[in-house]
Amino acid sequence: AAVSRILTAMFASGLFDNPATPDPDWSGPSAASQRELAELAARCAVLLRNDGFLPLDPTLTGRVAVFGPAAADRTIAGGPTRALENRDTVLEGIVAAFSGCRCALHPRYRPAVHDGHPARVRRLPP
C-alpha cells in the first residue's frame, strides 16, 4: 500500500514522463537558497588531512583511536538503505585491516577548535 501511494505521487508529479515535466511555477533556487545550500554542502564535506601518516602500515601494532560519531555510522555512506547493510563503517574497516591493533571508538569527541573532520584516526603510543 505504501509503495502504491509513493508511485502514484511520483507518476502524478511527472517524474516518469520522458522528459520529466518541470514545475512551471519554480524558477530555481533563489540566491539566498543557493548560498545556504553551498554552506550546507561545505559543512557536510569530509576532508582527511594527511600529515605523512597515510597510508597506514598494515603491519601496524599498538593502539588506534578513532574519533567522531561518523566513524561508526553506516548512514554517513549514503543514507539508511538496505544496500548499505553489508558495508563496513570506518571503524569496522580499520578493525578488519589492522587486526594487530587495539581499536577504540570515541564517538563523543569534540575538538576544542572544529577543523571540519567528523571522523579522525590517530595512532596512539603503545
Image (cartoon, rainbow, N blue to C red):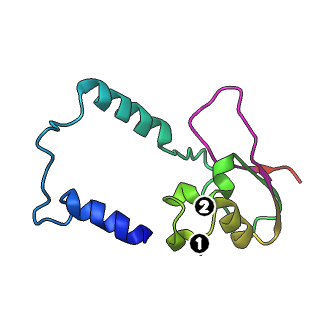
Residue 120 among magenta residues: yes
- The spot of residue 7 in percent (x, y) is 31, 67
Which residue is most to the bottom?
86
Identify which amino acid the numbered label 1 is placed on: Glu
Nearest the eye: 51 or 32: 32
Q: Are marks 1 and 2 in contact (CB under 8 Å)?
A: yes
Is 10 left, or right, of 51 in this rendering?
left
Q: Residues within 10 Å of mark 1 (few under 14, many from 20)?
A: few
Q: Residues within 10 Å of mark 2 (few under 14, many from 20)?
A: some
Magenta region, residue range: 104-122
For marks 1 and 2 on the same chain, the one whose residue lies earlier in the sequence: 2
Which dot marks residue 56? none
Q: Secondary structure at mark 1?
A: loop
Q: Secondary structure at mark 2?
A: helix
Note whether 19 is above or below 25 in the view shown: below
Q: Which residue is mark 2?
A: 74
**Magenta part mainly helix, strand or loop?**
loop
Identify which amino acid the numbered label 2 is placed on: Arg
Quadrant of the image occupied by residue 91: bottom right
Q: Quadrant of the C terminus?
A: bottom right
- The spot of residue 109 in percent (x, y) is 75, 39
Residue sitting at 63 percent across and 50 percent down? 70
Q: Which residue is mark 1?
A: 85
Residue sitting at 57 percent across and 47 percent down? 50
- The spot of residue 83 in percent (x, y) is 50, 73
Is 101 left, or right, of 91 in this rendering?
right
